[in-house]
Image: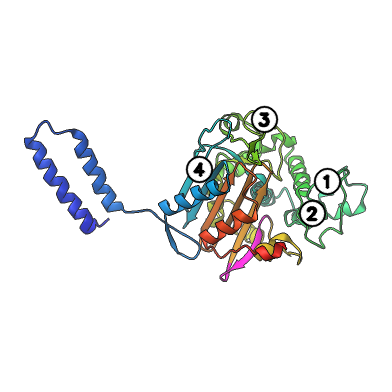
């Protein structure tokens, strides 16, 4: 690396100081160490982070923005990672894990990913397709009938593809009994219930119990992409490092002392910011799936209805097998939000540009017009939030 004018000046200053130290034996060693640090600082310069359009922001500028954002919205904690050219170029944590303890959020802090669990699980599903255990278009009842909906003949039409693109006809969550609300495959309706059914099918075809499915996920997904803190089952790491959720600026009982052993594909992933960012990098580098399967997974599979909230607010056009899709500056952007109430999250990425951003919070403030409008405006990633559509 070329040192440059400033680096040369630093070098001359360092040499001059070393000569003086030869004759002044009582000089303090910390001066030398300081000057070495100064030299390397002059050579390396500031770390620059680019957005989707290539616009540059300094780490310091981003730090100040997110700190001001959580202060203004009174958010307890936040973790953020930004990816440029398939590398994590920005990673930082803000605030506290709990307003009761005021312990700081760090890079080791684990959050509930909420519905950001779904894209990760979708890749796990595609691994079963790759292994030949699952056909995306074979009715799921042929693998495992679902007693909760077998009273309805339309249940025999539901496939894994329909569940991943949210056209199964199942609701997001049941109120009492589970009901199919329209002919499967004919419309889009976001459904966590569908993902839960599909997880049961994956357990069945792998000959394990549902709560043992995470062990296969660890081998086939997590350990393959340097994302070893992607967990669908509770463990000691979560119990030690999980943040506490917050609603209305009050801590909930949902923290590291709240143990939930249930495997939930729809919203049960626990992870840290770097592990999830590395999951996105595996998409950019196509390091997890056969290229044909990844292409199929990212292709738009269904158009969003005109009254869909994502279409209205950010101009989303459709859904792939795991992600929402929108077109920004003639580039395909993939996105997903997460809302477990006291834990909320967001991510979006441009695979062609190998750019992405992911953030986790232990509060109910991310999925709000205030957060999104400020966040999208600062990042200037081609996504805007249309307040007028809320009227």
- Location of residue 188 in the rendering, given as x and y in whole percent from the top left corner: 77, 60
Q: Earlier in the sequence, mark 3 or mark 2?
A: 2
> In the image, is residue 324 part of the stretch drawn in magenta?
yes
Mark nearest the camera among 3 and 2 is 3
Quadrant location of the C terminus in the rendered image: bottom right
Q: CA distance from mark 1 to mark 4?
A: 36 Å
List the single residue furthest toward the left: 23
Q: Estimate how packed mark 2 is, as few (under 14), some (14 to 19) or many (20 or more) residues with alpha carbons within 10 Å.
A: many
Q: CA distance from mark 1 to mark 3?
A: 24 Å
Determine the residue positioned at 58% across, 48% down: 73
Helix, strand or loop under label 4: strand
Q: Estimate how packed mark 3 is, as few (under 14), some (14 to 19) or many (20 or more) residues with alpha carbons within 10 Å.
A: few
> In the rendered view, does 365 fall on the left or right side of 64?
right
- Location of residue 107 in the rendering, given as x and y in whole percent from the top left corner: 49, 40
Q: Earlier in the sequence, mark 2 or mark 4?
A: 4
Question: Bounds of the magenta span?
Answer: 322-331
- Location of residue 340 in the rendering, given as x and y in whole percent from the top left corner: 69, 44
The residue to which callout 2 is attached is 159
Mark nearest the camera among 1 and 4 is 4
The residue to which callout 4 is attached is 94
Quadrant location of the N terminus in the rendered image: bottom left
Q: Earlier in the sequence, mark 1 or mark 4?
A: 4
The residue to which callout 1 is attached is 174
Helix, strand or loop under label 3: loop
- Location of residue 185 in the rendering, given as x and y in whole percent from the top left corner: 81, 60
Q: CA distance from mark 3 to mark 2?
A: 34 Å
The residue to which callout 3 is attached is 258
């Amino acid at each position: 690396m070329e040192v440059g004018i400033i680096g040369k000046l630093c070098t001359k200053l360092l040499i001059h100081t070393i000569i003086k130290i030869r004759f002044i034996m009582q000089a303090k060693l910390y001066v030398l160490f300081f000057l070495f640090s100064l030299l390397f600082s002059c050579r390396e310069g500031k770390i620059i982070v680019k957005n989707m359009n290539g616009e540059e922001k300094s780490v310091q500028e981003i730090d100040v923005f997110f700190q001001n954002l959580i202060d203004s919205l009174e958010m307890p904690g936040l973790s953020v990672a930004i990816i440029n050219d398939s590398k994590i170029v920005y990673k930082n944590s803000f605030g506290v894990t709990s307003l009761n303890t005021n312990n700081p959020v760090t890079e080791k802090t684990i959050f509930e990913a909420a519905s950001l669990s779904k894209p990760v699980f979708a890749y796990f599903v595609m691994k079963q397709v790759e292994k030949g255990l699952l056909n995306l278009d074979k009715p799921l009842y042929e693998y495992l009938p679902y007693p909760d909906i077998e009273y309805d003949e339309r249940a025999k039409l539901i496939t894994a593809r329909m569940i991943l693109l949210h056209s199964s006809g199942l609701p997001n969550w049941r109120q009492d009994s589970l009901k199919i609300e329209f002919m499967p495959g004919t419309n889009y309706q976001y459904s966590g219930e569908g993902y839960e059914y599909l997880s049961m099918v994956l357990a069945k075809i792998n000959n394990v119990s549902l709560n043992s499915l995470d062990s296969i996920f660890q081998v086939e997904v997590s350990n393959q992409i340097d994302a070893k803190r992607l967990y669908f089952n509770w463990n000691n790491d979560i119990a030690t490092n999980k943040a506490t959720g917050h609603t209305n600026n009050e801590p909930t009982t949902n923290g590291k002392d709240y143990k939930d052993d249930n495997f939930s594909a729809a919203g049960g992933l626990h992870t840290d910011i770097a592990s999830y960012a590395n999951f996105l990098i595996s998409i950019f580098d196509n390091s997890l799936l056969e290229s044909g399967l990844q292409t199929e997974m990212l292709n738009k599979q269904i158009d969003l209805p005109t009254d869909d909230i994502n279409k209205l607010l950010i101009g989303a056009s459709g859904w792939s097998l795991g992600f929402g899709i929108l077109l920004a500056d003639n580039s395909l952007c993939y996105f997903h939000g997460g809302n477990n109430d006291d834990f909320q999250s967001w991510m979006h990425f441009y695979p062609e540009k190998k750019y992405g951003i992911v953030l986790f919070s232990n509060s109910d403030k991310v999925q709000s017009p205030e957060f999104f409008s400020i966040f999208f405006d600062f990042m200037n990633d081609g996504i805007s939030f249309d307040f007028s559509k809320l009227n």
